[in-house]
Image (cartoon, rainbow, N blue to C red):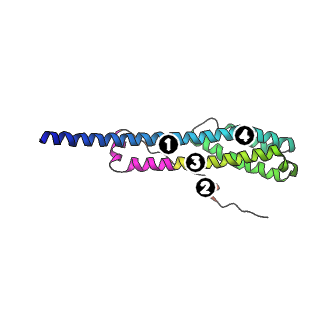
Amino acid sequence: MMTWISVAIVAIIVIYFIAQYNGLVKLRNWVQESFSQIDVQLKRRHDLIPNLVETVKGYAKHEKETLNQVVQARNGLVSGTPQQRIEADNQIESALKSIFALAESYPDLKANQNFLSLQEELATTENKVAYSRQLYNKTVKDYNIKRESFPSNIIAKMFGFQREELLTIPEAERDVPKVTF
């Protein structure tokens, strides 16, 4: 009778450890998938930007510097480490603000259907990028909590589950923008 109880206790412990390990694996994979979703949205933005730039070029040929910055930042999205790609993404956000400010100087451009359509697509994409970043950070948070909580932290340490870093924005972009009329 005592051996059956011992076997049952060992079986419960083994099943518990397996469940904890599988939970950590699932969360680690969700972290990777959620970062992949950011990549998907950045790729979408990457594909839209040349169309926007060409539309703006038609109206503002002498504003090449702004447009070249957008193209240069866009090219940084497709290669590099995740952190380098996030930095390129931040540069694009800044450059896109310049393009939309440029549109203010060209009333015909603001009314152009192609520009309006591309602007709407980019706004939608920006929202999707923001949502993807939020999802990534939430998934990383859940993974890190499970990885650091007892008793799953023992399993995480045994099998080398590493801490994941949250996406952050540069200090300069945390300031509240000034709006003047």
User: For the view shown, which residue lies furthest in the bottom direction?
Assistant: 181
Q: CA distance from mark 1 to mark 4?
A: 26 Å
- In the picture of the structure, the residue carrying the numbered disc 4 is 48
Location of residue 142 with respect to 57 vertically, above or below = below
Q: Is residue 144 magenta?
A: yes
Query: Taken as a whole, is the magenta stretch helix, strand or loop?
Result: helix
* Residue located at (37% from left, 43% from top): 156
Q: What type is the residue that disc 2 sits on?
A: Glu
- Residue 171 placement (x, y as % from top left): 61, 55
Q: What type is the residue that disc 4 sits on?
A: Leu
* Sequence order check, earlier mark of 1 and 2: 1
Say few, some or many: other residues with alpha carbon within 10 Å of mark 1 (under 14 / 14 to 19 / 20 or more). many
User: For the view shown, which residue lies furthest in the top direction?
Assistant: 79
- In the picture of the structure, the residue carrying the numbered disc 3 is 133
- Residue 84 placement (x, y as % from top left): 60, 41
Q: How many marks?
A: 4
- Classify residue 73 as left or right of residue 146: right
Residue 173 appears anywhere in the view: yes
Residue 167 appears anywhere in the view: no
| Magenta span of residues | 138-158
* Sequence order check, earlier mark of 3 and 2: 3
- Residue 176 placement (x, y as % from top left): 66, 61
Instruction: Please tell me which residue lies in front, 2 or 93.
Output: 2
- In the picture of the structure, the residue carrying the numbered disc 1 is 31
